[in-house]
Image: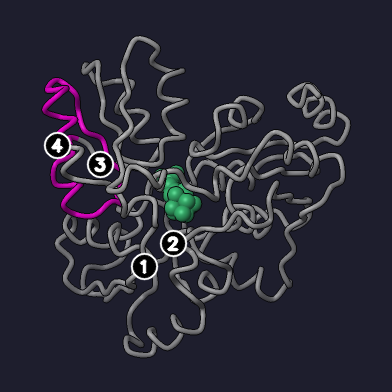
């Protein structure tokens, strides 16, 4: 079957839109109406007038779309597409952790469940995290969850000592090998190293540029370098190569090169076949009890408002 053709037909028939993250497979990005980073995808979900959103991403992203657009049907091509970072922060354990810091504001990355968002004051993504932290008065304590690497990076940028970090991480970004990255740099001395802030501090320390997926894309497009060593999930190379056909993008290797562990297994669960199936059957619909949805809405809206300032 020509899935791309059938998906286009069903999309039109059902007034559906496909949103895809940069980490999904190239062929999935190619059938999407909008491809973006976590922040841009939340904004697209909030503003679309489609009746159905097929979210080619992971569960917390589809959940965020549903929180913002409760009247729309939000479908996830594979209901098992979770996120190791979101899973590293269970709601009950986080509730206990918060009790130790009753006066701190909670800033949480969107890579969390609605149960964590309901305990959050302001959400953030890696694109706006610095802006969100800087919007909070310097004397106010902050709990940052769930990514300890992004949290430590923000501490290093802002010098804020009154920030406590939840000890979570993304399995993909934790697995990059410094040794192998430096070996690549020796082989490609002109290449610039670009890294996502979910990587460990010792990786960020050797990067020429650190940023969210969209920031990495912008940097690679405008920088004069012709070669880049890319330290994030390799799905992003599809867009980098499409936007810059004459430049070379080298995916950074994991510590164990036999495990393929720098692929996000969850993002890669999105396939054309599954997108076609959920569109056809309107299956894998995301539902959230209204009380939980309302609790999660405030911190997401607070984040989107900060972006407008
Ligand atoms: P951004 O697209 O916001 O940089 O996030 C990366 C990520 O880990 C998404 O799961
Ligand atoms: Fe989650 Fe990491 Fe996959 Fe992003 S790359 S969805 S943070 S597991």
Q: Position of residue 253 (x, y in %)?
A: 30, 39
Q: Residue 85 — which label?
A: 2
Task: Assess whether residue 29 is covered by the magenta stretch.
Answer: no
- Spatial CA distance of label 3 from label 4 is 16 Å
- Residue at image position (19%, 47%) is 203
Q: Nearer the viewer, mark 3 or mark 4?
A: 4
| Label 3 or label 2, whichever comes before in sequence order | 2
- Spatial CA distance of label 3 from label 2 is 19 Å
Q: Quadrant of residue 89?
A: bottom left
Find out whether the residues at labels 1 and 2 contact each other: C-beta distance under 8 Å.
yes
Tell me which segment is drawn in magenta: 182-208
Q: Nearer the viewer, mark 3 or mark 2?
A: 2
Q: Position of residue 43 (x, y in %)?
A: 56, 45
**Left or right position of 166 against 268:** left
Q: Residue 168 — which label?
A: 1
| Label 3 or label 4, whichever comes before in sequence order | 4
Q: Position of residue 172 (x, y in %)?
A: 39, 51
């Amino acid at each position: 079957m020509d899935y791309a053709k059938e998906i286009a037909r069903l999309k039109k028939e059902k007034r559906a839109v496909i949103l895809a993250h940069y980490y999904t497979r190239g062929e999935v990005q190619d059938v999407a109406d909008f491809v973006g980073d976590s922040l841009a995808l939340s904004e697209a979900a909030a503003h679309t007038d489609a009746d159905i959103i097929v979210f080619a991403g992971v569960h917390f992203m589809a959940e965020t779309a549903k929180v913002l657009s409760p009247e729309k049907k939000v479908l996830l091509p594979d209901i098992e597409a979770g996120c190791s970072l979101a899973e590293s922060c269970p709601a009950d354990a986080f509730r206990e952790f918060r009790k130790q810091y009753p006066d701190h504001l909670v800033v949480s990355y969107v890579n969390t469940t609605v149960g964590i968002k309901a305990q959050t004051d302001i959400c953030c993504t890696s694109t706006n995290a610095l802006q969100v932290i800087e919007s909070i008065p310097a004397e106010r304590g902050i709990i940052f969850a769930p990514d300890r690497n992004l949290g430590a990076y923000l501490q290093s940028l802002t010098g804020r000592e009154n920030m406590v970090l939840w000890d979570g991480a993304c399995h993909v970004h934790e697995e990059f090998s410094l040794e192998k990255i430096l070996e690549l740099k020796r082989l490609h001395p002109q290449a610039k190293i670009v890294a996502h802030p979910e990587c460990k501090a010792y990786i960020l320390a050797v990067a020429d540029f650190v940023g969210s997926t969209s920031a990495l894309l912008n940097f690679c497009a405008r920088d004069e370098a012709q070669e880049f060593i890319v330290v994030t999930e390799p799905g992003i190379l599809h867009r980098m190569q499409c936007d810059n056909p004459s430049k070379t993008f080298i995916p950074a290797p994991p510590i164990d090169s036999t495990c393929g562990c720098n692929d996000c297994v969850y993002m890669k669960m999105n396939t054309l076949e599954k997108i076609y199936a959920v569109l056809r059957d309107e299956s894998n619909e995301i539902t959230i009890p209204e009380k939980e949805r309302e609790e999660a809405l405030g911190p997401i809206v607070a984040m989107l408002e900060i972006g407008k300032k």
